[in-house]
Image: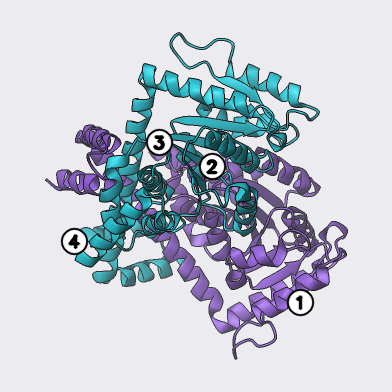
Chain colours: A cyan, B purple
Amino acid sequence: VVAERVAVRDLVERARGGDPRAVARLITLVERADGPHREVAQAVAGCAGQARVIGLTGAPGVGKSTTASSLVGALRSRGERVGVLAVDPSSPFTGGALLGDRIRMQAHATDPGVYVRSMAARGHLGGLAVAAPEAVRVLEAAGCDTVLVETVGVGQSEVEVVGAADTVVVLVAPGAGDSVQVAKAGLLEIGDIYVVNKADRDGADIVVRDLRQAIGVAAPEPGAWARRIVRTTATAGVGVDELLEALDAHAAWSLTSGEGARRRAARAATEIEALAVARMRAELEASWSSRGHSAVVQELAAEVAAGTLDPWSAVDRLLAVKEA
Amino acid sequence: VVAERVAVRDLVERARGGDPRAVARLITLVERADGPHREVAQAVAGCAGQARVIGLTGAPGVGKSTTASSLVGALRSRGERVGVLAVDPSSPFTGGALLGDRIRMQAHATDPGVYVRSMAARGHLGGLAVAAPEAVRVLEAAGCDTVLVETVGVGQSEVEVVGAADTVVVLVAPGAGDSVQVAKAGLLEIGDIYVVNKADRDGADIVVRDLRQAIGVAAPEPGAWARRIVRTTATAGVGVDELLEALDAHAAWSLTSGEGARRRAARAATEIEALAVARMRAELEASWSSRGHSAVVQELAAEVAAGTLDPWSAVDRLLAVKEA
């Protein structure tokens, strides 16, 4: 354990110095959560809140990766250090998408001021709700000024992770299912900034009009953030400056309104609860297997399969055994 | 409670008689799990194992719905009663897909011997691992001879639900990411029958060759199921008879080998464990909120957000409070 602690301290030191391999190794430790992940958590805890965290989500095909790449370019030209976390917990079909991301992010592949990382925290203790904020803190420890958390797929847990960011950007594009999909996904509630990408295409005006109506940009509550709609053509870099301006405006508002502090606390609460439930579940399962409860489960399962018992009554019996 | 029990008994009676609205109502009760769902579970428990359950999965665009629809047609022409459960737990973007399903299944919309149901068990206690098998038993109670469990999206939990079926059919198609995606998704392990759909297209031969190599159809273990590859063009109904023949062969093998009984017991065990964990989690959360632990979570979250505490140590404290 002492050796591991020393190694983690060394890794954190190297990450602070900008060593991308050290950053990658630390995120892997966090993701696996079966080694010295607690030491990593302790070492980077103090860096919480040092970066602004931007969440980026939208349906497949709206241009998330291209937009992310343009945004990274714009932030880099300001001299910021940038981390990109592409999250994808639910889909087993990620190979292609992740590969695509990496290829599109290749513009920044040799830039030492950009860290790109994909996370598919399947099977991880507590899932992305635990692993992603920890990875964000690693990137903060590495000196990132901005961390972009981007969804690869469109699963519920990714939307939750992204929706907990300091600023949430929702991308839509004409012809990509657009407004209906956004509404279905509950994205009309979580976005601070809406980007209508591929704004040079037919139908972009309709998407803007629908969005404007749906999110009520015209009449925000007093003191509330006035949600913005930005048009971009990310492939040509058009509109990226406007997006950056909207992001800065939201960051300034978050600071003065106290919303930023509120979101960070809420994010930490979600993380703690997810981790607590995951740990209790792991303890429960360990106690089942050590006390022979898996044999009881097998017996009960045979009855359910045979139709002589319903699963709710089976669980009544299982939990009664556990408590006995 | 007495009134509810009577109503459930009445619903089950009507479902047995083939009333589609009664079937729909029972599945809704099961899905919500906040009403007389235990009565439903008890009422249909005895029907477990009456239908054969076919799981159908594959990446988007391979033609799952068209294949399902052809298969339903073929089973109907044998006089079977058929249930179709389209599961989609993870994606928030389901509106279009589900709508598409319903439209494609419209060939059977007016057929009283076919029940079609979409399930997106987000937020359900225990998720699809609990809701889907219960819905299958409702369909069994309604006299279905075959229940087709089809994934709409490609999330991990859907693959788990489908992978627990009596017979698992994995669909691929040329040009749809094909073999690589199938390998990434772990589908090379779970399929009993592989369908290469859109077999009239360029590249179908390559997909078949890759699959043959990857799953090792040439050399099954002695006594094991020799996994089959079937070519179909579902839009034209080509190959559906061969698929049906492969399904029957697998059903016969499952019976003689004992694999069918083994899978049903394993499915019930998974269901019991998922329900047990979900119930313990619900009890834990109820105990937290009743004992003021959410205030403790808020305090700990403030420390994590401020960088003075790491989340693992926060959970140590939270669970210590709980036990105190």
Secondary structure at numbered mark 2: strand
Of all chains, the one bearing label 2 is A
At horizontal 62% and vertical 69% (from top left) the residue drawn is B167
Secondary structure at numbered mark 4: loop
Q: Earlier in the sequence, mark 2 or mark 4?
A: 2
Nearer the observer, A203 or A17 = A17
**Which residue was labeled with disc 2?**
A150
Give how far apart the Cα atoms at labels 3 and 1 are. Answer: 50 Å
Q: In this image, B187 relative to A130: left or right?
A: right
Where does the N terminus of chain A fall, quadrant-wise?
bottom left
**Which residue was labeled with disc 1?**
B209
Any part of residue A59 in sight = no
Q: Which of marks 1 and 2 is in front?
A: 2
Q: Earlier in the sequence, mark 3 or mark 2?
A: 3
Secondary structure at numbered mark 3: loop
Give the percent coordinates (x, y) of residue B212.
Answer: 72, 78
Query: Contact, CB < 8 Å: mark 1 with mark 4?
Result: no
- Which label is found at residue A12? none
Q: Quadrant of residue A6?
A: bottom left
Q: Which of marks 3 and 4 is nearer the N terminus?
A: 3
**Which residue was labeled with disc 4?**
A324
Q: Nearer the viewer, mark 2 or mark 4?
A: 2
Q: In which quarter of the image is residue A251?
A: top left
Do circles 1 and 4 both sit on a common chain? no
**Which residue was labeled with disc 3?**
A51
At horizontal 76% and vertical 45% (from top left) the residue drawn is B109
Give how far apart the Cα atoms at labels 2 and 4 are. Answer: 47 Å
